[in-house]
């Protein structure tokens, strides 16, 4: 019986090592790379500032009550901030719909325009002089952007892309070559090669359980092949 367990554990460990081993190597490599690259660099915080400029003089701002009267239903959140040098009030209702108001008059603003999006990107750029090449409107999510839609995509000559939702005018994402490099290894790490976001996939669960079985079978072989145990059997014989 002991010999059969040893043989079965040996076969199981061999096949699991062949199947799981390659993914284990990818986990180690991708995990190491993601640990080495600073997350601030991945987010391009050295290139673009996403911090909202606070309103300095709050005395003349429109009241929350006036903002609430313009929205059909209760407000879940309200914040005042600066947008291109002017105060705005950003309100979100219970259905997560965003409204942007003039912070002084309380008048509902229209969607952020193409020129405004370019000005927002230029003002947020902190690494020298930006070289923007295009401003395009996007209406569907992709691997690079999964935020509020529609949004403006402002691109530079170095293929840095800044995403600005039309409803808010804030910078919701920045994508660069470093981010794409990081995201590639992230997809390998979580085994979601298509969307790069699901870390509960059956592939990941199956290979994780396979790694556990490989460890158990390896420990079984270690116990069966323990040098001291074999030495005692040899001396006893």
Image (cartoon, grey):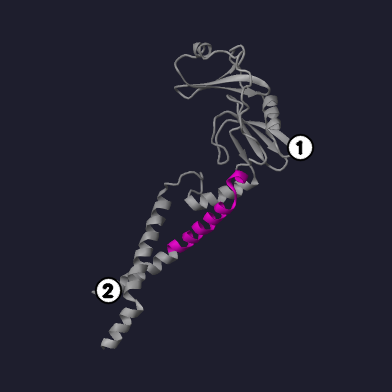
Q: CA distance from mark 1 to mark 2?
A: 71 Å
In the image, taking residue 2 as reference, residue 128 lies left or right, namely: right
Instruction: Give whichever of discs 1 and 2 has the lower sequence position.
Output: 2
Q: Label 1, secondary structure: give it.
A: loop
Residue 108's image quarter? top right
**Residue at 44% of width from left, 66% of height from top?**
18
In the image, taking residue 15 as reference, residue 133 lies left or right, namely: right
In the image, taking residue 154 as reference, residue 68 lies left or right, namely: left
Quick check: is 194 in the magenta stretch? no
**Residue at 56% of width from left, 47% of height from top?**
183
Mark 2 surroundings within 10 Å by alpha-carbon count, few (fewer than 14), some (14 through 19), many (20 or more)? few
Image: magenta residue range: 19-42
Q: Which residue is mark 1?
A: 129
Quick check: is 31 in the magenta stretch? yes
Q: Position of residue 25 (x, y in %)?
A: 50, 61
**Residue at 60% of width from left, 44% of height from top?**
40
**Residue at 54% of width from left, 58% of height from top?**
29
């Amino acid at each position: 019986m002991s010999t059969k367990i040893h043989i079965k554990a040996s076969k199981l460990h061999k096949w699991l090592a062949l199947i799981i081993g390659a993914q284990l190597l990818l986990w180690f490599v991708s995990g190491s790379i993601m640990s080495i690259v600073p997350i601030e660099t991945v987010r391009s915080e050295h290139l673009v500032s996403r911090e909202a400029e606070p309103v300095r003089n709050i005395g003349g701002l429109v009241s929350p009550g006036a903002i609430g009267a313009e929205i059909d239903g209760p407000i879940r959140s309200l914040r005042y901030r600066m947008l291109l040098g002017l105060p705005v009030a950003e309100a979100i209702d219970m259905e997560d719909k965003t409204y942007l108001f003039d912070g002084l008059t309380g008048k509902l603003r229209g969607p952020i325009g193409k020129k405004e999006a370019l000005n927002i990107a230029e003002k947020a750029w902190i690494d020298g002089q930006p070289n923007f090449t295009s401003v395009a409107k996007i209406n569907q999510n992709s691997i690079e952007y999964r935020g509020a839609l529609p949004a403006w995509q402002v691109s530079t000559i170095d293929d840095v892309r800044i995403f600005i939702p039309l409803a808010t005018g804030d910078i919701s994402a920045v994508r660069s070559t470093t981010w794409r490099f990081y995201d590639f290894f992230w997809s390998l790490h979580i085994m979601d090669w298509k969307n790069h976001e699901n870390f509960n996939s059956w592939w990941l669960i199956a290979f994780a359980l396979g790694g556990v079985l490989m460890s158990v079978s390896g420990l079984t072989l270690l116990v069966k092949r323990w040098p001291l145990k074999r030495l005692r059997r040899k001396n006893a014989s």
